[in-house]
Image: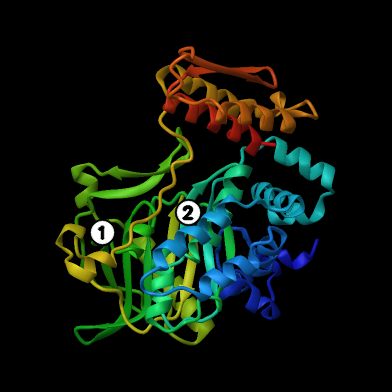
Amino acid sequence: MDDNLILWMQDIRREDSEEIGEKVKTIAEICNAGFPVPPGFVITSKAFLGFLEENEIKDILRNLLKEVNKENYAEIAEKVQRMILDAGLAAGLRKEIIESYSNLNVNLDVFKMVNRSTLSMIKSGRELPYVAVRSSLIGEKDYNEKPLTLLNIRGGSNIIKAVQECWASLYSEKALLERLNNNVPQTSVSAAVLIQRQVNSEKSGVIFTTHEQEGIVGMLIEAGFGYGESIVLNQINPDRYLVDKNNLELKGLEVNKQDFMYTRDETMERTKKMNLDVNKASGQVLAAGEIKALARLGNEIEKFYNNPRYVEFALENGKMYIIQAKGYQELKKPHVKKDELQGEEKQDYIEIKVPEQKTELLENSESLFKMFDNDISSIMQPENVQAKIEEKKEQIYNIHSDDKKREDRVSTEIAGVKIELPRTKEGLRIARQILELIEGQL
């Protein structure tokens, strides 16, 4: 396989820029400069091109995209995205993505030193990591890039689905329309996909490394509880801290009420929106020491680039991580509640995508997922498990919930584990997802 299809962050070089996009390029720069960045790797645009060619849909997509206009863009978007989501990855690429994903749980120094069998032993004793999967646009940039971000993705098959969703997002209705409005050829863009360990942040936000306010030239830090997407997507009104760049002293403070935050649902393995209690909602997000540490980090990043930077950060267990550090011309627009937006402004409001990898379980089914999570390796011994999974999935997909002659339960058995659920749409969906969960652990 072409070694350039997947690149680890620390291995990215200047000559790789055209295959990884500006987002990944910036993150790789700060990673290799020694700043605290979550470990990760990128699936380059070469992999996307190979995926289209192997599935023999490259020319079909290209011809469809050439016909896009104001009347048919929605219809073409649906067709193109469906082709990408329904196609399959080559076995070699699929294997390498899943193997790279599983290596995220191993310390980088250990990863470089040990042999494959030792590495396998280390990984077998650790849980699969949660990751953030983000698209990184490559090509014309005369319009605002709004890359897809998927949070708290876990398991091999879910990673593969997320990668294909990122590729498909390149041809969403909104993306096609924006290119039309900006006279950007629909066939001129491609995408890489960044996969990083998910920082389960307790606090997060952005640093504007240079900002002038009321005659004070300093640094502006915006912060909120939970994941930073609520701030980046302008869904909350964050706390604001104006800091003197020279002595790092706080010169201005604005504490704003935050009604909710995004965080991880450990039971359902997904991102959830959680309401905050009154005290936390109205409390100050950052402590004095955290403000000073973030300001110092902002100064160092600005010095590294020799120009002002918009820095996205996350705090987890007392550690700081940098998620992004891009240039900026002006501050983002002030927060406006969604129900106060009107007309075109309302159409431009972006919701964070919070994928539901599992549906809500029936009361008697919850322990089944816990059993898989605790010791899946002991179940997955037979060499033909993959074939059995595909066979069982096909059987379940062929059961129709509207069959009036059906029994009231659906059951199947895989690798010694019996799955039995109500033969309803919800039950069938859960059964499919259990099998996909087992497949993702292989």
Question: Looking at the image, how many numbered discs can be counted on the residues?
Answer: 2
Nearest the viewer among 329 and 144 is: 144
Please state the horizontal and vertical placement of residue 257, each as a whole percent of the image.
19, 55
Report which quarter residue 391 is drawn in: top right
Q: Quarter of the image for the N terminus: give it.
A: bottom right
Q: Secondary structure at mark 1?
A: loop
Q: Quadrant of residue 19?
A: bottom right
Q: Residue at x 36, y 70 (%)?
A: 71
Q: Tell me: 271 left or right of 81.
A: left
Q: Which sits earlier in the primary sequence, circle 1 or circle 2?
A: 2
Direction from residue 284 to residue 146 in the image, left or right: right
Which three-letter amino acid code belongs to the residue tagged 1?
Ile
Q: In the figure, is residue 206 to the left or right of 161?
A: left
Q: Determine whether 376 is above or below 13 in the image.
A: above
In the depicted structure, whether residue 307 falls above or below residue 435: below
Provide the residue designation for mark 1. Answer: 236
Which one is in front, 24 or 219? 24
Residue 379, x across and y down, in percent: 70, 24
Q: Nearer the viewer, residue 433 or 111?
A: 433
Q: Does 422 sit above or below residue 116?
A: above
Mark 1, residues whose alpha carbon is within 10 Å: few (<14), some, or many (≥20)?
Answer: many
Name the residue at 78% across, 29% down: 384
Q: Is residue 13 visible?
A: yes
In this view of the protein, which residue sits in the foreground, 51 or 147? 51
Q: Secondary structure at mark 2?
A: strand
- Where is residue 143 drawn, in percent x and y? 41, 79
The residue tagged 2 is 150
| Residue 24 seen by the camera | no
Q: Bin the neighbour count of mark 2 within 10 Å (Cα to Cα): few under 14, some 14-19, many 20 and up.
A: many
| Point 38% across, 71% down: residue | 207
As shown in the figure, which amino acid type bears the numbered disc 2?
Leu
